[in-house]
Image: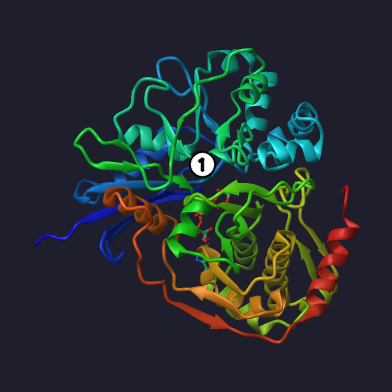
Amino acid sequence: MSETLVAGIDSSTQSVKVLLVRAEDGVVVDQASAPHPGGTEVHPAAWWAALQEAGRGLLDRAAAIGVGGQQHGMVALDADGEVVRPALLWNDLRSAPQIDTVVEHLGGPQACADTIGSVPPASFTVTKLRWMAEHEPENAARTASVALPHDWLTWKLAGGTEAGADLITDHGEASGTGYYSPAQRAWLPEVAAWALGRDTAPVLPRLVDPGAVALRTPSGQVLSAGTGDNMAAALGLAIADGDVVVSIGTSGTAFCVADAPTAEPTGSVSGFCDATGRYLPLVCTVNASRVLAVVGTLLGVDHDEFARLALAGEPGAGGLTLLPYLDGERTPNRPDATGVLRGLTSGVTRENFARAAVESLLCSLADAVDALDVKPNRVLMIGGGSRNAAVQQLAPSVFGQQVQVLEPGEYVALGAARQAAWALSGAATPPLWAPAPSVAFEGEPQPRVREQYDALRDATVGW
Ligand SMILES: Nc1ncnc2c1ncn2[C@@H]1O[C@H](COP(=O)(O)OP(=O)(O)O)[C@@H](O)[C@H]1O
Ligand SMILES: O=C(CO)[C@@H](O)[C@H](O)COP(=O)(O)O
């Protein structure tokens, strides 16, 4: 008897990854990836071209397909379904000035968080729509519908050509827009209309319930609702209460599952929905694996040599402290920040420079975990940066607890595949797949590392 295969897609910031997975037990039978262009403004056609390249010979073998994608990106479509302008991505912080406008419109920080689940950072789509209305009114006026990266790709897979005709999304992705209510689990079209500076709301994707069949491809394959990449990772890892996931990709994220929506008024925690009908409070930073890449490039070394150098450095990096807000920062909200290096002396070494970079990344992620305000039973680490031996070995001493590093894998794409298998099965709950293997790392707590970092972070407010 032939096995049933499903495909999971992760259309993330730097690349697209496609997994072909056995529906029955989640075993990956084939995979491929293709790069995305750099920058924070990308034409969606580039994602579609990359997906076609990576999906060749894989997607057509799947009975069902699920798409996970980088969250928040603004894909504005005109009445003919054409892209109005290149998408502004989650890490494009030009709409930071529009945060206050949105918060004021919704009645202040707490009212805003109660209405849309979050005090929106510049990543959220609503601030980008508002930016477009203020800076490109002709594009705002032409916008007939608004999708997000995974919605648009799912629509393309369904053969969509008419704006709004069959755009779909899920509650997880919708909760990152800023014109959706996690408490009511419904769109707020009036907020989208206001953001675009007009009376009529754009067409918003139809909300599909977790586990439902959303659409079909022209050849009849099931398309599940898809979701944002962090929700997909949560589904791929099948996280439970007490688990906190730390993901080190282009973004750094810390998230957990919850029974009730979050409405945190400081703006640190985004109150998302997950992909199973529950909630996913999440803290996100924009400077993650790139911090390691930038310092590694300056030192002229590859990932492995960089890790070796960092592990040969001293705890606290001999007093060298890096504040890693290289490209501005989202959490804390410092969109205009740049990186700061303190404690540079003539005794500086390559080892301590590498060490300072790893410690700074881990401290910013430890801040993210703290902002969630939960006591983790388990910290699970995923993402490209978690493959770095120095990150793995130093994380427990910075987080002050054991860290489980998941075996290298594409957990966003795996979660999207699990959602596809769920939709295909018609069952009430996702299929049970074996948990991904992980390695546990332990370490002596090093409070001095965080003290040094906290002092620099707090001394540079307003820089
Ligand atoms: N061993 C490693 N050490 C440090 N960084 C790494 C290592 N392996 C991969 N990366 C980084 O991980 C990033 C990709 O991670 P990924 O989770 O796929 O990101 P995204 O989903 O945002 O595209 C790249 O920036 C790459 O440089
Ligand atoms: O904005 C967020 C979460 O709110 C980011 O986590 C994006 O979803 C991008 O993810 P990666 O490409 O870094 O995985």
Characterize the local packing of mark 1: few (<14), some (14-19) or many (20 or more) Cα atoms within 10 angstroms. Answer: many
Horizontal side, residue 433 vs residue 74: left or right: left
In the image shown, does 433 or 286 lie closer to the viewer? 433
What scheme was used to colour the molecule? rainbow
Residue closest to the far front:
428
Percent position of residue 242, x then y: 60, 69
In this rendering, is residue 376 above or below 424?
below
Local SS, label 1: helix
Percent position of residue 159, x then y: 29, 29
The quarter of the rendered structure image containing the N terminus is bottom left
Horizontal side, residue 419 vs residue 369: left or right: left
Horizontal side, residue 62 vs residue 415: left or right: left
**As shown in the figure, which amino acid type bears the numbered disc 1?**
His
In this rendering, is residue 190 above or below 313?
above
In the image shown, does 402 or 78 lie closer to the viewer? 402
Residue closest to the far bottom:
444
Q: Does the rendering let one see residue 344?
A: no
Classify residue 415 by image quadrant.
bottom left
* Residue underneath mark 1: 171
Percent position of residue 375, x then y: 69, 70
Residue drawn at the location 63% of the way across and 26% of the way down: 129
Percent position of residue 91, x then y: 62, 44
Classify residue 413 by image quadrant.
bottom left
In the image shown, does 214 or 221 lie closer to the viewer? 214
Residue drawn at the location 64% of the way across and 23% of the way down: 132
In this rendering, is residue 87 above or below 243?
above
